[in-house]
Amino acid sequence: EVQLVESGGGLVQPGGSLRLSCVTYGFNFDDYEMNWVRQIPGKGLEWVADVSMSGRTTYYADSVRGRFIISRDNAKKSLYLEMNNLRVEDTAIYYCVKSFSFHFDSWGQGALVTVSS
Amino acid sequence: SSVLTQPPSVSVAPGQTARISCGGDNIGARGVEGVHWYQQKPGQAPVLVVYDDSDRPSGVPERFSGSKSGNLAALTISRVEAGDEADYFCQVWETYNNRANWVFGGGTKLTVL
């Protein structure tokens, strides 16, 4: 069974940093691109970042490019999101997501990030 | 980048058919690789229910079907049940400014009367 388990969420002040982690189970991690998708509670979904199977290629939404860094450790079957210079509007639930052929086929339960003074 | 437009809400009686639309100028264009649909129940993560316009993952009931014509995609739920009440999101992948980009519609709340 595929499982994705996020950790590292919490409360941070504007301008601060936070690192999310996602450990995965039940599939060959290095055979799939991985993504982060976020959702303001009660609102819609927003794609945040993508990393290739090798980790060498990354893509970012315009709203986070230059502030967030997505990375992976295939040996640890883990995905990461380093979030810097956080803004109030970055407050959201962040989902670790496995992608396949342009869609997202498995989602974690999410980690809540709150940016507030 | 693409903008995907969904109706904010759809209401249907149990046993009837619900149709949720997803419109966008680029849906039918080359470089937009299919339309995908997700169901999200309160307090839960989204779940894929239709991918590549009309394919269903294993475990998703045949009552869920997808279609696309021109710049409009649709998710149809036949014989609606109370348990289908949820938010539904469409999604496409595109290239934008020579970069990969994943786009979601704003979501539709399905209410079962």
Image (cartoon, coloured by chain):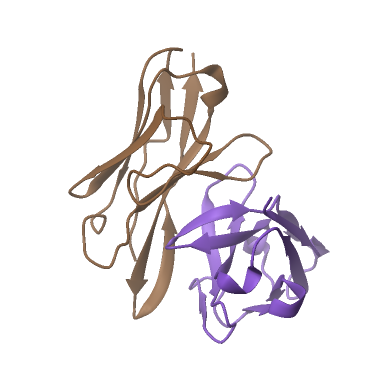
In the visual, does A9 lie left or right of B69? right
* Residue A84 seen in the figure: no
Quarter of the image containing the C terminus of chain A? bottom right
- Chain painted brown: B
| Occupied quadrant, residue A97 | bottom right
Q: Position of residue A19 (x, y in %)?
A: 76, 73
Residue at 39 percent across and 78 percent down: it is B99
Residue at 62 percent across and 79 percent down: it is A67
Residue at 77 percent across and 75 percent down: it is A76
| Occupied quadrant, residue A51 | bottom right
Q: B28 or A116, which is in the foreground?
A: B28
Residue at 74 percent across and 70 percent down: it is A14
In the visual, does A33 lie left or right of B95? right
Q: Position of residue A6 (x, y in %)?
A: 75, 60
In the visual, does A103 lie left or right of A65? left
Name the tint of chain A in the rendering: purple
The residue lying furthest to the left in this view is B70
Q: A5 or A65, which is in the foreground?
A: A5
* Numbered-mark total: 0
Q: Position of residue B30 (x, y in %)?
A: 22, 65
Above or below residue B100? Residue B79 is above
| Occupied quadrant, residue A25 | bottom right
* Residue B26 seen in the figure: yes
In the visual, does B61 lie left or right of A39? left
The residue lying furthest to the bottom in this view is A56
